Amino acid sequence: MPSARSWRAYPQTYRLEASRCSGCQKTFFPPRQVCNACSGREFETFRMGYGGTVVTHTVIRTPGDQFQGEAPFAVGIIAMDDGPKMTTQIVDVPLEEIRIGMKVKLEFRRMYAEGHDGVIEYGHKAVPLRE
Amino acid sequence: MSVGIVGYGAHLPRRRIKVEEIAKVWGADAPSYKKGLELLQKSVPALDEDTITLSVEAVRNALTRAGGIDPADIGALYIGSESHPYAVKPSGTIVAEAIGAVPSCHTADFEFACKAGSEAMFVAYGLVKAGLVKYAVGIGGDTSQGAPGDALEYSAAAGSAAFIMGDDPDKMLATVDETYAFMTDTPDFWRREHQFYPSHGGRFTGEPAYFRTTLGAVNGLLEKANLKPEDFRWAVFHQPNGKFPARVAKMAGFTEEQYDVGRLVPLLGNTYSGASPLGLTAILDVAQPGDRIFMCSYGSGAGSDAFVYTVQDRIREVQNLAPKTRWMLEENTIQVEYGEYAKMRRKIRLAGE
Amino acid sequence: MRDVAVIGVGMQKWGEIWTKSLREIFVESALLAMDDAGIDKLEAMYVGSMSPGLFAAQEHIGSLLADYLGQAPIPATRVESACASGGLAFRMACMDVASGMHDIVLAGGVEKMTDISGGEATFALSTASDMKWEGTCGVTFPGLYAMMAVAHMEKFGTTREQLAQVAVKNHANGSLNARAQFPTKITAEQVINSVKVADPLNILDCSPITDGAAAVIVVPADMVKNFQQPGVKVTGTGHATDTIALHDRDDLTVIDSARLAGEQAYKMAGKTPQDIDLCEVHDCFTIAEIMVTEALGFCELGGGGPAVAAGHTALGGKIPVNTSGGLKSKGHPVGATGVGQVIEVVEQLRGQSGQRQVKDAKVGMTQNMGGSGGSSVVHILEVM
């Protein structure tokens, strides 16, 4: 029954809610209870924007069972313009075109489904920023 | 007090498949499809795209154009689709949660074949007009499936359009001046519970269904509004293929110049509940203040919703704030072959399925 | 605190052990260690195991293994820190003996990984990542290390060929180890042309899925004379943690937990990297060995690739790394790996390593790592 596990994280997975330490201004995604830089315990919540930059990346060719049938797919670490870093898939781009430093934008996507009769987990994946 | 659109947005999957690519798999004659249906390609959602994901992106674009309204002021959100990801569990709750409209928000999922999107717009408009809510969102989106090899496979496509209705004159982009709905029980296209692909009545979907219903709504609205086709700068009709909207426009007295901008289907395919709403977004992307727009949807089963809009001054400020529909349609695309399309549309049965 | 020494080691050949269960492979290795020490009674035991629940549908293995080893009712503790579980179990045993609580303590490790499918094993291993914020997007462990490799290659110019050289070296070492899962030499060309797993890592850059167990006996150093084997003293231990989500680290090209655990162990032992005669490091992927040799100070940051290419870390080089064959060739039964590393160093310091013996080895080091570097355990061992 993982639906409660995903449900309680909807503010983060659906709306990209992050937090900023009131003491030292360090940003966290997901929010934390204790700042790992200054040990502060007071935070303000804010919604991240969708823009970011690829810090590193790879192509998953042998996925775990939950992602069978989807490989190959790219994943990367994205440094969000608003501070925190996150790991997510990089989609809608030829795999060989992904580069460190590439500008991306997060889009709302299906992350995975719990089998054929379980809950669908939604979240954000990165697409190349095109104007 | 005028009520109308204060924010609009669209979102399309990036992948496209050409008619030739589908036809060669089934030994069909591509030129006859291209000519007969006026279809060149269609959009293909990826494995991780569905009606909900496309709609969240469309609403976010609409919010961007709505100029900083607080999502908490959205009192109602309706999403029309024939491809809701869940049979039981609303799509609207996910979209509302993703944009931050929860919890004070009335939400429902609509289904009426290809007219569910305009239904959502109709009800959203009506609630604001009644003074029950400050803002209401109407969304039409689909990731429709056609059975492999069936004529529908060449057109069943994906996309979503969202409209925020409100009565704030400072935010008004296009007023809704008149509405009309036409509906009879006409079974031209359906999908029974537990069936993966829809069924249709072949040529019965044309004359007694699409054309009779659409013209009924067009004539009903023109009469109700006391307007003539030449009073409109733009017109958009439901577009299951390229030919139907052109023909129904001509029958109703509209010209190609009026309907061409909103007729996305040759390059997009039929986005079902998203079809005429997406056409409307493409028109709003280029419309000028004062332009009058005619819109008529069609949903099998069968019915049409028709609207008259008048474009307001603020449109100029917002057209470039979010991706334009024609740009998404024509520029930001990836062509796929049938194999990847079959994988993306889960037409390949994997282990454990 | 009392000084601590290892006086018994035991380990069967690792690999796909279809005919034996988790408890059987553990008891076999534990008995070998007890026989090596010449004892049949323990006072306490610590067993490293990452996920017997997911791999073998069995939790509560501290008691289970103590019972099947004929040692119940002694206190038996399962220790978990993902792939560093074995190294941490050894550290717990050393701390137990050093504290004076017990005199004869077994430190073991075990993992039975082949009873489930490859996809299920990939999932089980991925639970050592931040499942909610890394795992839900489909990233695997090879994927996480591949992302470190991409960052390392971008920053330092580390090459695909250098990565392959780690696997070539470790398989050459493993070919001299009868207990290795894959005791076969391979070429860089084979590595580079092997099946792609997570770009730039191919299957021969990855440690295998392995069944295996390992055990050592730890006693107070001043009791060593009571036993039949020469004692090997544990002079340094270090243990450090880091964010388990790779993306939460400021620098993706340095494994800080290894660096910090190494600094603790060097300080405690009063040694520097130049004093180390051989080191077993956690080469779960080829890039990991390169980054750990940098973190432990055997070369400059960014120097790990050139060092392996120059042969500095080969048998006969300046600092032989993974003389056992490493996780790459010897196998990686995750919970047992850290104890297996200790066994290699103890045998080297005893002069019992045969064809792969490092000449005059006096000081050896082990580095065992959990996840993508969320934990590291380092030990320094010396001849007495």
Image (spheres, coloured by chain):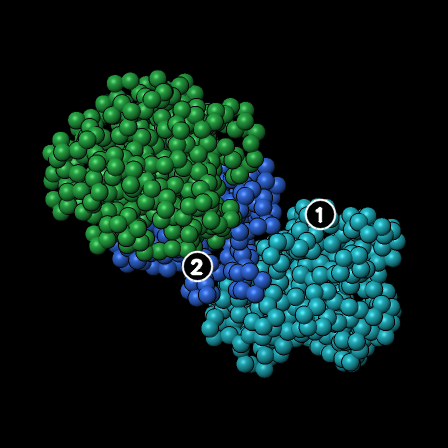
Q: Which chain is cyan?
A: B
Quadrant the N terminus of chain B occupies: bottom right
Circle 2 chain: A
Q: CA distance from mark 1 to mark 2?
A: 35 Å
Residue in the image at 53% along x and 60% along y: A114
Q: Which chain is blue?
A: A
Q: Position of residue B214 (x, y in %)?
A: 80, 73
Residue C3 or B83: which is nearer the viewer? C3
Residue in the image at 48% along x and 41% along y: C143
In the rendered image, which residue does mark 2 sit on?
A12
Residue B353 or A25: which is nearer the viewer? B353
In the rendered image, which residue does mark 1 sit on?
B339
Q: Position of residue C332 (x, y in %)?
A: 40, 38
Which amino acid does the dot numbered 1 rest on?
Gly
Task: Bin the neighbour count of mark 2 within 10 Å (Cα to Cα): few under 14, some 14-19, many 20 and up.
Answer: some
Quadrant the C terminus of chain B occupies: bottom right
The nearer-to-camera label among 1 and 2 is: 1
Task: Bin the neighbour count of mark 1 within 10 Å (Cα to Cα): few under 14, some 14-19, many 20 and up.
Answer: some
Q: Position of residue A102 (x, y in %)?
A: 52, 40
Which amino acid does the dot numbered 2 rest on?
Gln
